[in-house]
C-alpha cells in the first residue's frame, strides 16, 4: 500500500488526511506517477461549437488542430470527444496534454491564432487551458493497463494507493492539501478582446474529467452498465449541465469519446468546471443526483465484484489563478466558463 | 447559523473542519446545548436478556430499576426499549441520563448490586455506562420540539448549526476533534469477577444512538416511511448486528422504544458500539448497507420536503478508556461488548 502523494511531493503537514494511518481501502485503485523531474503539466481543451449538421469548417478545423498536435512541440497525448450542450449545439472537444510547459508555450501561439483568431469564423471556438503544478492535481484509476487523459503522459502507474474509497480521498490525493485548504478567491470576470471573449476565473478553480470505459465488458455486463448505471450517470450530468450553477458548477459536459475515424467509442467522460474543490465534494457526497450515481455504481460493482470489466478513472485539478486560460469566440453565452461570468470588463 | 461547538468549548485548532468557513448546509439541523457548568454526562444502559415469554424476573427487575430511577440521585431522564437479538433472545434496555457524575456515583452502587450482583439470577443482565466529558460527544436533531436521549437533560436546543449534511459533520461537531484524531488504542479484554464478566474496552471507543420517530406522520407519510425507508434501515441494522465485527462494529441493537405501559411506541433507535469514530464514519459513508439507508432517506426527504413529520436524531460519543464501564451476567457470549473480546483475564 502506498500513498497517492509521491515521496518527492511530501511536505510537513499543517492539515490532516481524513482517514487514520491504518486505513485500508476495501478494493484497489491506482494513480498516475510522473517522473520527479516533471513539475507541471498542461491540459488544453480545444472546443468547436455548431448547430445541426457540421459545416465544412468543422472538419477543416479538426484536421488542422490534429496536424498541429502531431507537429513540433505538440502534446504527448491527445484525444477527442463530442456532446450536445444545453442550448442544442454540438460540441467537439480535442484535449491535449503536455508535461513540458516550454514546449506548450512554443506551440500554443500559432495554434491559438488559428483557433480563435480573426480568421476563425462560421462556428464557435473555445480554448480552455490549465497548466497546474503537479502538487495541484490528482488522478484515480479503478484498474491498470489502460491509461487515459493526463495519465497517458505519466511515467507509469502506482501500486494500490491508500487514499481512496472514502469521501475526502480526492482532496487527500492532491499534494497541496497537506498544507492548503484550496479555498476559492474572487469571481469569474469577462474580458472582451475584439471577437475574443476571455474569462479570468479565480484562484483554486477546480476541473474534473471523470471517465467511463465499457469497451472490455461482455454482453451481460455491458447491458447492466448501459441499463442500470449509465442512465443514472446521465441524469446527474444533465443536472450539473442545466442546474449546476446554483451549487458551484460553472459548466458540465458529458462527452462521448471519438475514435481516430471520428466515430463514437465505448468510452465517455464528464468534464466540469467548479468554483472550488469543496463545491465538487459537496455535490459528490450529498446531492441526490450523485448519491444516485454512487448507489448505482456500488450496486453494480458489488454485483460483479472483481470480475467487472468496466474501467473508471478521473483527474481533478485545483488551479492557481495564473495557471488558467479561457478564451471563447462566436460561442453561445452558456459555453464553458462564460456561464460563470458575473462582471464584464473590456481590454 | 451557529457552530455545533459551543463557545466555551472552542479551542485553538490543530485540526481543521472538513468544510470551508462559508459552508452553508442545505437544510437546518440542531444540537443539544448544556449549561456551560455541565462538564460531563452519564449514559447508562441497563439490559435484561431472556428467551421466549418473559419470566417473572423480568417484570420485577424492570419495576425495581424504574423505582431506583425515580429515587434519590436518580437520572434526569430515562427511557426503555426492546429488541430481539441475533441469538433469538429478547432484550429490554432501560437507558438513563445524568448530568452530575457525583449523583450517578452515589446512585450507582446499590443499583449495580441489585442488577448484576449474586442475587440477580434467572435472566441475563448487563450494564453499559459511558460518562463522557462534554467535549467527547455530539447530538443532531432534524427538528425542534421533541428532545430525545441525552438532549432531554440539556438546557435546550441550538439554533440551526453549520456542521451537518456532509460526511465528517459528526466528527466536526465533537469539540475534541478540534485537536484530537480520537484514534482507538488497545483491544477489549474480559475480566471475570465471580458471576460477573466485565469488559475493559479501549481508548476512544465509540457509541452511537440514532433514532427515528414517526409518531407525528400522517397516513401517507407513515406508509412511505414504513414501506420505503424502514425496511432498508432494518437491513442495515441487521448487517451491523450479524456481520459488524469485520468492519469495527462490536455490537448493534435496533431497538423499539416502549411507552410507559410497556407497549411499543412509534419510535425506534439503533444503538451500536464501535472500535472508533473512523470505523463508524467508513460504514456510514461507503458501506452498501448504509449507502442504501442514506439513499432511501434522501429520496424520502426530497419527496416530502419541509412537510416531512418524521423526526430523526442521534447522539455520538467517543469515550476515553476511564469513561467506560461494561458488566454482563448470565448473558450469551455475543451480548454487547462481550462480542468484541479477544483476550481473557481474571480478577
Image: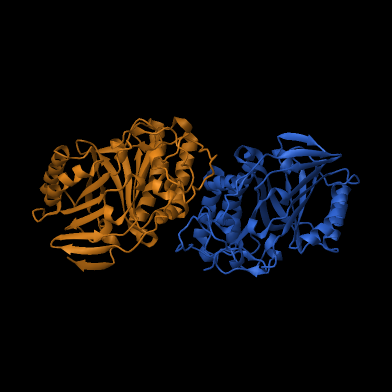
Chain colours: A blue, B orange
On the question of residue B73 being in view, the answer is yes
Q: Nearer the viewer, residue B74 or A231?
A: B74
Instruction: Identify the residue at the far front of this view.
Output: B12
Q: Position of residue B273 (x, y in %)?
A: 32, 54
- In this rendering, the answer to whether B311 lies above or below A182 is above
Q: Nearer the viewer, residue A90 or A206?
A: A206
Q: Position of residue A284 (x, y in %)?
A: 56, 48
Residue pictured at 16% horizontal, 49% vertical:
B53
Residue pictured at 85% horizontal, 50% vertical:
A115
Residue pictured at 26% horizontal, 68% vertical:
B343
Q: How many numbered discs sit on the rendered protein? A: 0
Pick the quarter of the image with the C terminus of chain B. Answer: bottom left
- In this rendering, the answer to whether A216 lies above or below B69 is below
Instruction: Identify the residue at the far left of this view.
Output: B119
- In this rendering, the answer to whether A293 lies above or below B216 is below
On the question of residue B140 being in view, the answer is no
Q: Position of residue B28 (x, y in %)?
A: 46, 35
Amino acid at each position: 500500500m502506498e500513498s497517492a502523494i509521491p515521496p518527492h511531493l511530501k511536505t510537513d503537514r499543517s492539515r490532516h488526511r481524513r482517514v487514520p494511518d491504518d486505513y485500508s481501502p476495501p478494493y484497489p485503485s491506482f494513480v498516475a506517477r510522473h517522473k520527479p523531474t516533471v513539475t507541471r503539466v498542461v491540459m488544453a481543451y480545444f472546443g468547436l461549437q455548431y448547430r445541426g449538421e457540421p459545416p465544412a469548417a468543422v472538419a477543416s478545423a479538426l484536421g488542422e488542430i490534429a496536424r498541429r498536435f502531431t507537429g513540433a512541440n505538440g502534446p504527448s497525448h491527445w484525444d477527442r470527444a463530442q456532446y450536445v450542450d444545453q442550448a442544442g449545439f454540438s460540441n467537439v472537444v480535442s484535449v491535449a496534454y503536455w508535461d513540458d510547459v516550454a514546449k506548450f508555450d512554443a506551440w500554443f501561439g500559432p495554434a491559438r491564432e488559428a483557433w480563435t483568431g480573426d480568421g476563425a469564423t462560421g462556428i464557435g471556438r473555445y480554448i480552455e487551458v490549465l497548466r497546474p503544478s503537479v502538487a495541484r492535481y490528482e488522478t484515480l484509476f479503478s484498474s491498470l493497463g489502460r491509461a487515459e487523459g493526463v495519465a497517458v503522459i505519466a511515467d507509469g502507474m502506482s501500486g494500490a494507493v491508500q487514499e481512496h474509497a472514502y469521501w475526502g480521498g480526492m482532496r487527500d490525493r492532491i499534494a497541496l492539501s497537506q498544507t492548503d485548504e484550496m479555498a476559492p478567491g474572487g469571481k469569474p470576470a469577462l474580458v472582451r478582446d475584439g471577437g475574443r471573449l476571455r474569462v479570468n476565473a479565480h484562484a483554486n478553480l477546480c476541473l474534473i474529467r471523470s471517465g467511463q470505459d465499457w469497451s472490455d465488458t461482455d454482453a451481460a455486463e455491458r447491458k447492466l452498465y448501459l441499463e442500470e448505471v449509465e442512465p443514472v450517470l446521465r441524469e446527474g450530468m444533465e443536472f450539473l449541465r442545466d442546474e449546476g450553477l446554483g451549487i458551484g458548477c460553472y459548466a458540465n459536459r458529458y462527452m462521448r469519446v471519438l475514435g481516430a475515424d471520428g466515430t463514437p467509442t465505448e468510452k465517455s467522460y464528464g468534464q466540469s468546471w467548479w468554483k472550488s474543490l469543496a463545491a465538487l465534494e459537496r455535490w459528490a457526497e450529498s446531492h441526490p443526483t450523485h448519491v444516485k450515481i454512487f448507489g448505482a455504481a456500488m450496486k453494480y460493482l458489488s454485483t460483479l465484484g472483481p470480475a467487472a470489466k468496466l474501467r473508471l478513472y478521473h483527474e481533478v485539478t485545483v488551479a492557481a489563478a495564473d495557471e488558467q486560460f479561457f478564451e471563447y469566440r462566436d460561442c453561445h453565452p452558456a459555453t464553458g466558463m462564460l456561464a460563470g461570468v458575473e462582471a464584464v470588463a473590456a481590454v
